Image (tube, grey):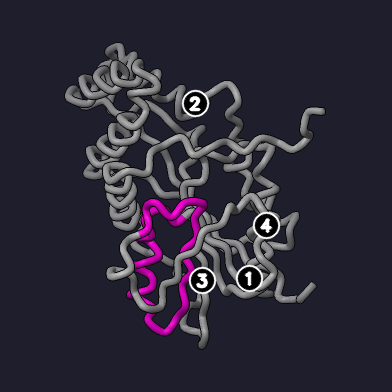
Amino acid sequence: MASSEPEVHAYPLKRNILASTRLNFNHFWLKSMTGYLVHPKINTAKEGFRLADLGTGTGIWASEVAAALPNARIDAVDISAEQFPPEAFKPQNLHYWVHDCFKAFPAEHSGQFDAVHMRYWLCIVNDDVAEKLIENVVTLLKPGGYLQWFEFLPYTAHVRGNAEGIPTPGCDKLVELYKKPSAQSTYNWVQSRPQLFEKYGMSLVVEDRIENQSHYMQVATQSTFLGQAEYYKMHPEMEKLSEQVAEEYRNGVVVDIVFSCVVVRKSTEAH
């Protein structure tokens, strides 16, 4: 009998040293764009503050937060430990553990966190599994706890810098891939995160929409190239696409996209 459970997509990128470099590169770029790690609307000064970073990857975001908040406890969680740093480089208040966030969290973590951070889940979350993930995540939060979720908005992808109207087949194709990388990709959930969170007792605190300034466009384009390179072996056509996009980039044409940081808060009433 076929399962009625929606399919959760496997992580499509690599976990080697170059992939880790890409994640860290993206981290510093995004931090420069936003100007914060933890959103300033989240009170991190309370005694015993505890935060979970889900899908932590290399743990670079969690590591910086742990260093900035030495009196807090930071938990860094991922389905794989492959990209975790060596023990010698971990702040003492940072704790790594492995968990599949599409599955229920162990009971000892229920209602234990003042804040949860998530970033770049888009590549494995479609509309049919988004609520399953959110339902699990919300269980981690204390009453009054915050969820900070950062994603790019795929439907905002567009060609930028083509004032002369020259043909840009590479960038045009890349825009299509951002919006729908496969026939199974459905990203309406990203646009409607605040409404989805409301169903689970969360209220919107703030949504920041972040746009690339011109001086970041080379960084944004380089990030795209690094990500595409991880697909070359499995999808050789991606290398040709990267070459097209690189040629168009040299002519001042790029693909741009808007980012969104949503902060919501769980009801202060215990359930």
- Mark 1 vs 3, N-terminal side: 3
184, 198: nearer the viewer? 184
Residue 191 counted in the magenta span: no
Nearer to us of marks 4 and 2 is 4
Q: Amino acid at mark 2?
A: Pro
Tell me how far mark 1 sits from mark 3, CA to CA.
11 Å
Q: Earlier in the sequence, mark 4 or mark 2?
A: 4
- Asked if residue 100 shows in the view, the reply is yes
Q: Check if mark 2's residue and mark 3's residue have beta carbons within 8 Å.
A: no
User: Mark 3 = which residue?
Assistant: 51
Query: Residue 181 has which mark?
Result: 2
The residue indicated by pointer 4 is: 136
Q: Quadrant of the C terminus?
A: bottom right
| Mark 2 element type | loop
- Establish if 243 lies above or below 128: above
The stretch of residues the image draws in magenta is 56-84
Q: Residue 109: give its label.
A: 1
Image point 45% across, 29% down: which residue?
178
Q: Mark 2 Cα within 10 Å, few/some/many (few <14, many 20+)?
A: some
Badge 4 amino acid: Asn
User: Which label sits in the foreground, 1 or 4?
Assistant: 1
**Element on which disc 3 rests:** strand
> Counting other residues with Cα less than 10 Å from the Cα at mark 3, is it few (<14), some (14-19), or many (20 or more)?
many
Residue 20, x across and y down, in percent: 31, 48
Query: Which quadrant holds the N terminus?
Result: top right
| Lower sequence index among marks 2 and 1 | 1
Relative placement, left or right, of 148 versus 229 is right
- Along the viewing direction, whichever of 136 and 96 lies nearer the viewer: 96
Left or right: 181, with 233 as reference point = right
> Residue farthest to the bottom?
47
Residue 80 — which label? none
Give the structural element (helix, strand or loop) at label 4: helix
